[in-house]
Image: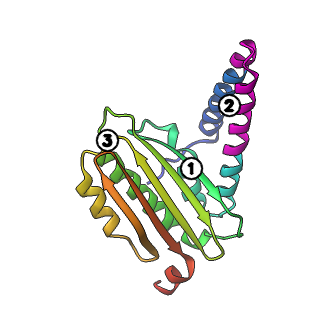
Amino acid sequence: MMKKRSTLEVLRHSRHDWLNRLQLIKANMSLGRWDRVNNLIDEIVLESNHESGLTNLHASMFAEYLVTFHWEPRLFSMEYEVIGEAGLNLSDYDHSLYKWVTSLFSQIETAVDKKAENHLFLSMHIEEKEIRFFFELSGIIESTEGLSTWIENQPNGFWVEDSQVSKEGCEMQIRFSCEESHNNK
């Protein structure tokens, strides 16, 4: 289950993240690396826009898990993007999405080499009544069987449209339909 954090703990993590970003900008300014300063600012704006898109889905448990993912020690790094602004309200599916993504991330942690640099890129494409998830995992996967089994056993509302698992990484495209999920309730 999701870790319950106090307001002060959330503020401490957020402040730490922002101070790291400001220190990077300041260091590059002092070195006269103005292109890098502009790139860092663009990255921060883009990341903030994706975070805003995620929170606008009205799935608070799901969004909180992704936003705070890097606050705990992990065996893989993760970044995400949110594409589209269809006004999709996922509040009725928040718990299902949270359980689904935590199950996947737990499976990834079990599957990857603990000493390798593993990275997951998640792209969420928001459409009128569905969301398409594109996962791209790079690194070293020691247990392809476990990940393949997880992919094959999707809960109601989730459909695998494409997947490839190898020792070097994994790519998958999974569709979640609000209408089809609602019909299966």
Which mark is in front, 2 or 1? 1
Question: How many neighbours does mark 2 have within 10 angstroms: few (below 14), some (14-19), or many (20 or more)?
Answer: few
The kind of residue on which mark 1 rests is: Tyr
Q: Nearer the viewer, residue 162 or 15?
A: 162
| Residue at (70% x, 44% y) in the render | 46
Query: Real-space Cα distance between discs 2 and 1?
Result: 18 Å
Q: Nearer the viewer, residue 24 or 56?
A: 24
Residue assigned mark 1: 80
Evaluate if marks 2 and 3 touch, with contact meaning CB atoms under 8 Å apart. no
Quarter holding the N terminus is bottom left
Q: Which mark is residue 18?
A: 2
Quadrant of the image occupied by residue 19 = top right
Evaluate if marks 2 and 1 touch, with contact meaning CB atoms under 8 Å apart. no
Q: Is residue 147 above or below residue 116?
A: below
> Which mark is first along the chain, 1 or 2?
2
Q: Nearer the viewer, residue 46 or 53?
A: 46
Q: From which residue to which does the magenta span run?
A: 26-47
Q: Judge left or right: residue 68 versus residue 54.
A: left
Q: Secondary structure at mark 3?
A: loop
Q: Is residue 109 above or below residue 162?
A: above
> Which mark is first along the chain, 3 or 2?
2
Q: Secondary structure at mark 2?
A: helix
Q: Which mark is residue 140?
A: 3
| Residue at (65% x, 64% y) in the render | 58
Query: Real-space Cα distance between discs 3 and 1?
Result: 20 Å
Question: How many neighbours does mark 3 have within 10 angstroms: few (below 14), some (14-19), or many (20 or more)?
Answer: many
| Residue at (66% x, 70% y) in the render | 89
Q: Judge left or right: residue 35 versus residue 159.
A: right
Q: Is residue 110 above or below residue 23?
A: below
Q: Residue 90 in the image: state x and y as whole percent.
A: 61, 69
> Which mark is first along the chain, 1 or 3?
1
